[in-house]
Image (tube, grey):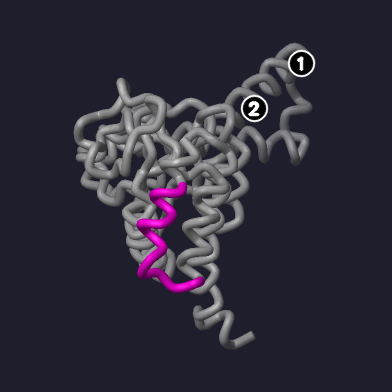
């Protein structure tokens, strides 16, 4: 595998600036380029693969960085217009990354189970979210004290359950303008709902994914934490430029 890495590094850095070369080296160091087994490759992802090493897909990093930067340009425009973004990643290894990234930028997020109808049945989901918010407010203001101990226990359990389901979307008052997905294959229902409603999608996706429904596919390791940390950090840096250029920031 070391031979393939050296080959790709040599091929892609010949015409790059020092900064671009450093970026490619970071991507290699964080494992962005490692896909899954060759036998799992979706034929539609083949064009994003540089080679295979010991049966493992090696992504073409020039394509990955170009596609990621295209997605960032689109997302920057969405953020500059203050349109809602929904980040989705429910795999155990990425739950905290998704939550922290979303909260950093004021995005809605789903890092537990995707609820069928979150998009296509948004009005009904919103009513459940409103009930959840009211239940929390009633507890905080002591309104639940009028119920028996057993009833309060059941309500507390309901709040805990609904927190897992709705905490990330409780401030989502309208359909998201774009979905940012970690592993499209793992969130088929979300992809299907977004496609039906013609909501644009950005997706970090491995070689076993289908890129066709995705507006901005980003071929990369979608399971390794170091890879996802690097990708989300690059997105964050792009979005920080939007914040620094906003009227509010300029006034300050």
- Measured in 3D between alpha carbons, the distance from the residue under mark 1 to the one under mark 2, in whole angstroms, is 16 Å
Please state the horizontal and vertical placement of residue 132, each as a whole percent of the image: 57, 33
* Image height of 170 relative to 68, above or below: above
Quadrant holding the C terminus: bottom right
| Quarter of the figure with residue 35 | top left
Q: Is residue 113 magenta?
A: no
User: Residue placed at 25% from the left, 37% from the top?
Assistant: 45
Q: Which callout, 1 or 2, points to the residue nearer the camera?
A: 2
Say what secondary structure mark 2 lies in. Answer: helix
Magenta residues (range): 6-18
* Residue nearest the viewer, comparing 124 with 207: 207
Please state the horizontal and vertical placement of residue 141, each as a whole percent of the image: 75, 40
User: Residue placed at 41% from the left, 26% from the top?
Assistant: 54
Q: State the residue position of label 1.
A: 148
Circles 1 and 2: CB atoms closer than 8 Å? no
Q: Is residue 13 magenta?
A: yes
User: Residue placed at 34% from the left, 48% from the top?
Assistant: 60
Horizontal side of 104 relative to 208 (left or right) equals: right
Q: State the residue position of label 2.
A: 159
Residue 175 can be seen in this image? no
| Quarter of the figure with residue 139 | top right
Quick one: label 2, few (<14), some, or many (20+) residues within 10 Å? some
Please state the horizontal and vertical placement of residue 190, each as a whole percent of the image: 34, 33
Residue 25 can be seen in this image? yes
């Amino acid at each position: 595998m070391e031979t393939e890495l050296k080959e790709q590094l040599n091929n892609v850095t010949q015409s790059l600036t020092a900064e671009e070369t450093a970026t490619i080296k970071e991507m290699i160091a964080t494992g962005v380029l490692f896909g899954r087994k060759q036998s799992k490759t979706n034929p539609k992802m083949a064009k994003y693969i540089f080679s295979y090493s010991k049966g493992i897909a090696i992504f073409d990093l020039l394509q990955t960085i170009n596609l990621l930067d295209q997605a960032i340009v689109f997302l920057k425009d969405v953020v500059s217009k203050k349109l809602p973004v929904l980040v989705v990643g429910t795999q155990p290894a990425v739950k905290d990354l998704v939550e922290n990234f979303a909260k950093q930028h004021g995005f809605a997020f789903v890092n537990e189970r995707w609820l069928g109808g979150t998009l296509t049945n948004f009005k009904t989901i919103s009513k459940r979210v409103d009930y959840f918010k009211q239940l929390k407010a009633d507890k905080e203001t002591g309104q639940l004290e009028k119920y028996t101990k057993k009833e309060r226990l059941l309500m507390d359990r309901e709040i805990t359950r609904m927190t897992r389901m709705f905490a990330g979307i409780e401030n989502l008052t309208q359909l998201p303008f774009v979905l940012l997905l970690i592993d499209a294959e793992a969130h088929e229902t979300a992809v299907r709902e977004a496609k039906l409603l013609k909501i644009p999608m950005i997706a970090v996706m491995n070689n076993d994914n289908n890129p066709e429904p995705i507006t901005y596919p980003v071929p990369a390791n979608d399971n390794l934490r170091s890879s996802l940390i690097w990708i989300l950090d690059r997105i964050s840096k792009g979005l920080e430029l939007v914040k620094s250029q906003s009227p509010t920031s300029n006034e300050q």
